[in-house]
Image (tube, rainbow, N blue to C red):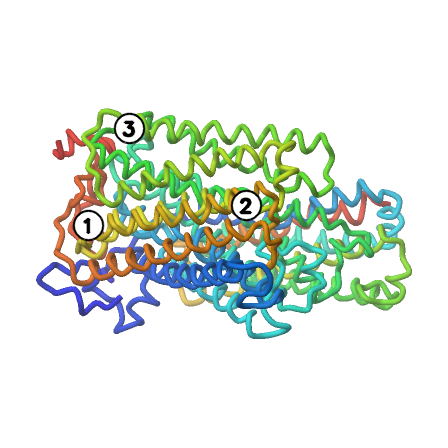
């Protein structure tokens, strides 16, 4: 975030108008773009930590038996990998970073509805993150429960689950406040002419996401609070010896954590919708269907939580009902995929890095989504439950989906925010490496899972060695690609060629203002919107 | 930052209502657990629930309902520029909150003196369903008690803002939002009271 590297001649925009000196100009700023960048850099830092932990997991699994760490360390490492990637990277990733950076500009607002609350959310996020990291070194050592904190183990283990549970509570509170801020912003601060059907699809998905954040997150808040109470006060609401039921923990946990999957992926879908339309130079196909499918995913996604619990002992009727509901979610998801393809069809496609990452989202998300049907169907799920097939599946949708969308958003919007362009050739090369490494790593995981390798063990039988080594090779290629991508884009942001207002030819509002944007985005007069977000003819792009 | 001051009362209230949804859902988790465990242990819930004293619960219900009335009148008073009346009513509301907590203190102390608390020998000797009942009773009313304290702090902070003139007859949305929060605290009690003190008798 060094401001000095942006020369005054380039037009420093909001970089040049710090409310306070030095670091305080960032951590006490209420400007949505500064807060967005605070989130972005915090999130990227945690992502890099999470990747490092993931590589450690793969190294341990390079050979059967103890390779580089013992069983207890392995438990702590995969728990930490999960907690960091889920709560510190994927959930806040696109909404908190790019939502803050871009959403107010896309609707023609000068900031979010509650700027101070927005800053408070970031502080809560950092507090929760520090608590999560502190739990590693205090109490009984790093939590070893996996990111799901299932009772009864989480209530009994001597490791520091209590602090980690509080960290999740605080992070959830941060997520709730961001959600209610965004919903209020989108309702109240749209500029003249920004009707509901002129809102860019990225902002629409943030709107759907924000509702899930508001309505689902409190449930995990109370769940981890009860876990905390069970550990500290001994109020065993999930403890069978006190009449409690551990299954109720799983229900409450997934009532949040399954909708949270859509908190993770919906904004990514929005990023892809915007990018596909801009780089195909065509209006997004089926705009209204895209909007409705976002809301439908948010709604239907709230009714499917027990598909994580087919083998937990819930009734057969419940399994059938939840299996059926799970299949319903596939419909709006498929609508989105077909609409992206229809948008690309006969477009004049510019194969720039943002589109490449968006295309890999479409492919990998589709593969991941289809493997999800194997898990959603109860009969097949029983066989692959808790195997590496599940691990491969959710890495396809979360990393291949949301992760790729995050990278796409970086390559699409960061030149706008910093006013400088990265090297597109290197970005393309890094995309190829990432894609190849990704496929080797996670396809190997899926295959070894089908063969029966269970998840969460540091050891395995010798028959699985070949595929595990292949996956570890893939993780090295993937890491190499990630390093190349990050170095290239960050170098470009600080030293690259200046870009104009509209490097990609977008028609939505963020491309009509200078790069970097000024502090309140628009000059003295609020913009007046006269056409849709993908009307490239009226915007003068075509 | 520039001097561009943005005031959006509807937006501020809209945001508050969204926040109240999240509070309802927070307690919703506990109400779900109550429903599930009531269905599983109906006899034990009735025998354990019979030990709660309806006079404590009923008294606190009266206290909270009265306090909500005070807050509602204080908003109207402030809008009609009767600042001293508004301050007095808010002070009375905070007094009601204190009364509520004192009442709760005596109620819980009485329970504790009978050995009804997690970890006690008497607790361990009770039936599992009764243990669940008291656990969920302590957690639900405890969480509600925390909300009463938070609500009282918010009202006290609002009184400071009224005193300094930042909240006044023209600019009173903070008071209204604080009042909304207080009504929510009241509303949750309106569900807790019958579920724990009335229907199990």
Residue that badge 2 annotates: A448
Left or right relative to A54: residue B104: right
Which label lies toward us, 2 or 3?
Answer: 2
Q: Position of residue A314 (x, y in %)?
A: 72, 38
Q: Residue B1 lies in what quarter of the image? A: bottom left
- State the CA–CA distance, disc 1 to disc 2: 36 Å
Q: Nearer the viewer, residue B105 or B121?
A: B121
SS assignment at label 1: helix
Please rate how many residues cluster around mark 2, counting C-alpha atoms within 10 Å: few if below 14, some from 14 to 19, many from 20. many
Residue that badge 1 annotates: A424
The answer to whether residue A491 of the structure is visible from this angle is: yes
Q: Position of residue A310 (x, y in %)?
A: 67, 38
Q: Nearer the viewer, residue A497 or A122?
A: A497
User: Do residues under tags 1 and 3 come within 8 Å of each other at their CB atoms?
Assistant: no
Q: Position of residue A125 (x, y in %)?
A: 45, 61
Q: Residue at x 61, y 49 (%)?
A: A454
Q: Residue at x 31, y 36 (%)?
A: A199
Residue that badge 3 annotates: A343
Q: Residue at x 70, y 54 (%)?
A: B140
SS assignment at label 2: helix
Q: Earlier in the sequence, mark 1 or mark 2?
A: 1
Q: Chain of mark 3?
A: A
- State the CA–CA distance, disc 1 to disc 3: 23 Å
Q: Quadrant of the N terminus of chain A?
A: bottom left
């Amino acid at each position: 975030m060094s401001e000095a590297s942006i020369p005054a001649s380039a037009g420093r925009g909001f970089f040049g108008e710090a409310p306070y000196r030095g670091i305080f100009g960032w951590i006490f700023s209420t400007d949505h773009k500064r807060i967005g960048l605070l989130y972005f850099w915090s999130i990227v830092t945690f992502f890099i930590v999470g990747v490092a932990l993931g590589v450690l997991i793969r190294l341990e699994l390079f050979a059967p038996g103890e390779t580089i760490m013992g069983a207890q360390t392995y438990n702590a490492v995969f728990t930490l990998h999960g907690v960091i990637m889920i709560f510190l990277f994927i959930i806040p990733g696109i909404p908190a970073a790019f939502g803050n950076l871009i959403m107010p500009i896309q609707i023609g607002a000068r900031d979010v509805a509650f700027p101070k609350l927005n800053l408070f959310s970031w502080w809560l996020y950092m507090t929760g993150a520090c608590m999560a990291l502190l739990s590693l070194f205090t109490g009984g050592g790093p939590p070893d429960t996996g990111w799901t904190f299932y009772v009864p183990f989480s209530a009994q283990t001597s490791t520091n689950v209590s602090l980690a549970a509080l960290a999740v509570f605080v992070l959830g509170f941060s997520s709730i406040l961001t959600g209610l801020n965004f919903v209020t912003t989108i309702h109240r601060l749209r500029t003249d002419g920004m009707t509901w059907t002129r809102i860019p699809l990225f902002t629409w998905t943030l709107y759907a996401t924000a509702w899930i954040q508001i309505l689902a997150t409190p449930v995990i808040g109370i769940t981890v609070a009860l876990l905390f109470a069970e550990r500290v006060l001994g109020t065993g609401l999930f403890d069978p010896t006190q009449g409690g039921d551990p299954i109720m923990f799983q229900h409450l946990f997934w009532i949040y954590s399954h909708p949270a999957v859509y908190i993770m992926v919906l904004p990514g879908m929005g990023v892809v919708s915007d990018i596909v339309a801009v780089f195909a130079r065509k209006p997004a196909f089926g705009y209204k269907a895209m909007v409705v499918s976002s809301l439908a995913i948010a709604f239907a996604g709230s009714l499917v939580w027990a598909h994580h619990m087919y083998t937990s002992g819930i009734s057969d009727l419940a399994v059938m009902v939840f299996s059926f509901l799970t299949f319903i979610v596939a419909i709006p998801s498929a609508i989105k995929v077909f609409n992206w393809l229809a948008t690309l069809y006969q477009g004049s496609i510019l194969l720039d890095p943002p589109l490449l990452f968006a295309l890999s989202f479409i492919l990998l998300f589709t593969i991941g989504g289809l493997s999800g049907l194997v898990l959603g169907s109860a009969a097949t799920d029983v066989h692959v439950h808790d195997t590496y097939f599940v691990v491969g599946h959710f890495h396809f949708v979360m990393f291949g989906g949301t992760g790729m969308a995050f990278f796409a958003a970086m390559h699409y919007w960061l030149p706008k925010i910093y006013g400088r362009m990265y090297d597109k050739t290197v970005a393309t090369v890094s995309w190829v490496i990432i894609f190849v490494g990704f496929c080797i790593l996670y396809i190997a995981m899926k295959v070894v899972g089908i063969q029966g390798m269970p998840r969460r063990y540091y050891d395995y039988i010798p028959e699985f060695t070949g595929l595990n080594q292949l996956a570890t090779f893939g993780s090295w290629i993937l890491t190499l690609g990630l390093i190349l991508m990050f170095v290239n884009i960050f170098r470009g942001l600080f030293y690259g060629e200046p870009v104009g207002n509209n490097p990609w030819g977008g028609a939505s509002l963020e491309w009509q203002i200078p790069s970097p944007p000024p502090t309140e985005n628009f000059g003295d007069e609020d913009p007046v919107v006269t056409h849709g977000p993908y009307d490239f003819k009226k915007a003068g792009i075509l | 930052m520039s001097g561009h001051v943005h005031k959006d009362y509807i937006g501020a209230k809209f945001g508050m209502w969204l926040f109240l949804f999240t509070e309802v859902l927070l307690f919703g988790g506990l109400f779900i657990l109550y429903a599930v465990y009531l269905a599983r242990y109906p006899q034990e819930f009735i025998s354990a629930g019979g030990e709660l004293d309806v006079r404590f619960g009923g008294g606190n219900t009266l206290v909270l309902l009265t306090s909500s009335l005070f807050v509602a009148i204080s908003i109207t008073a402030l809008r009609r520029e009767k600042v001293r009346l508004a301050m007095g009513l808010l002070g009375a509301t905070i007094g009601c909150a204190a009364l509520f907590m004192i009442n709760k203190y005596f109620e819980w102390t009485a329970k504790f003196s009978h050995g009804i608390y997690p970890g006690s020998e008497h607790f361990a000797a009770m039936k599992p369903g009764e243990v669940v009942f008291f656990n969920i009773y302590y957690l639900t009313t405890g969480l509600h008690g925390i909300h009463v304290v938070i609500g009282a702090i918010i009202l006290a902070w609002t009184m400071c803002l009224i005193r300094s003139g930042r909240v006044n007859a023209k600019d009173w949305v903070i008071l209204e939002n604080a009042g909304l929060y207080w009504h929510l605290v009241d509303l949750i009690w309106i569900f807790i009271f019958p579920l724990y003190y009335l229907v199990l008798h």
